[in-house]
Image (cartoon, helix red, strand yellow):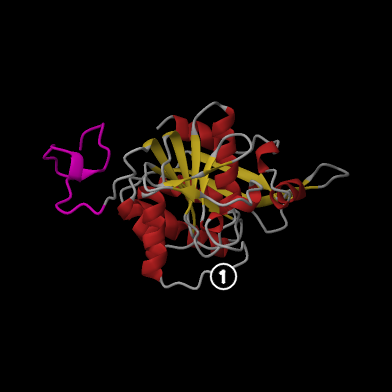
Amino acid sequence: MSENCSQNCESCNENCSERKADSLLVHPHEMSHIKKVIAVVSGKGGVGKSLVASMLAVMANRKDYKTAILDADITGPSIPKAFGLHGKATGSETGIYPVRTKLGLSVMSLNLLTENETDPVVWRGPLIAGTVKQFWSDVIWGDVDYMFIDMPPGTGDVPLTVFQSIPVDGVVIVASPQELVGMIVEKAVNMSKMMKIPVLALVENMSYVVCPECKHEHKIFGESHIETIAEKHGVKAVARMPLDPRLAAACDAGMIELFDGNWLDEVLEAIERM
């Protein structure tokens, strides 16, 4: 495989050993130029995957990268709320335009297309997977340095569709401290290996809570297992995030772009080193 491989066999003339006879990759919109795609995944729901995806996108935007978020969690979209987006995406015969946040991130989510934010998405898997592919192929993203995909939890149909249809450059896996979740996160690591996509970092969310009085870290969900898993699978970048009510409040208020914290600095550095 060439070191400049884009993973898109359809547009490549190289006859390398990794070439796929029938590539399932979908081309982005002709007016989209996306350099790097990072999928933020979790083995189960409720571990803070959307929070981590939002924070990484904000951090990249603060470093003057052109940044976008594709919300692939169709049945549980939470990205618009975190950024305070309540308007609707617009489009033309050319394609769909993403919604811009206050500080200039591009976002596409199903909540930006439905009539009401609380309308449930009662769809079967193929329709959900097709919508995710359309977010990639029909949205006019423009020039993007880093696109973060907020993936649905698990290793099922939609994550598989994303990995096969979109040229994902790397994966960031989010977990919580419980041993059961440690087992589940290994499933996500192994899925990434099966798809030949590198795991760039592991993030342990809700790793501890800091006492406001004594400033001591209390591990209310038990001891961390994230470094053991990272070492086992050769993942070099590890981050531990606290259970911090300020982050929850920022998301609820639609002000995640104003968060203050350096917990994910090592993760963003790993992404930049790609």
For residue 171, above or below residue 175: above
Give the quarter of the figure containing the C terminus.
Answer: top left
Q: Is residue 152 visible?
A: yes
Q: Percent x, y for residue 158?
A: 40, 62
Quarter assignment of residue 4: top left
Comparing 81 with 265, the one in front is 81
Quarter assignment of residue 59: top right
Give the quarter of the figure containing the N terminus.
Answer: top left
Q: Main secondary structure of the magenta part?
A: loop
Comparing 92 with 235, the one in front is 92
Q: Is residue 265 visible?
A: no
Q: Determine if the magenta segment contains residue 5.
A: yes
- The amino acid beneath tag 1 is Pro
Q: Residue at x 50, y 73 (%)?
A: 122
Q: Percent x, y for residue 28?
A: 33, 44
Q: Residue at x 27, y 38 (%)?
A: 6
Q: Which residue is mark 1?
A: 120
Residue range highlighted in magenta: 1-24
Q: Residue at x 51, y 31 (%)?
A: 269
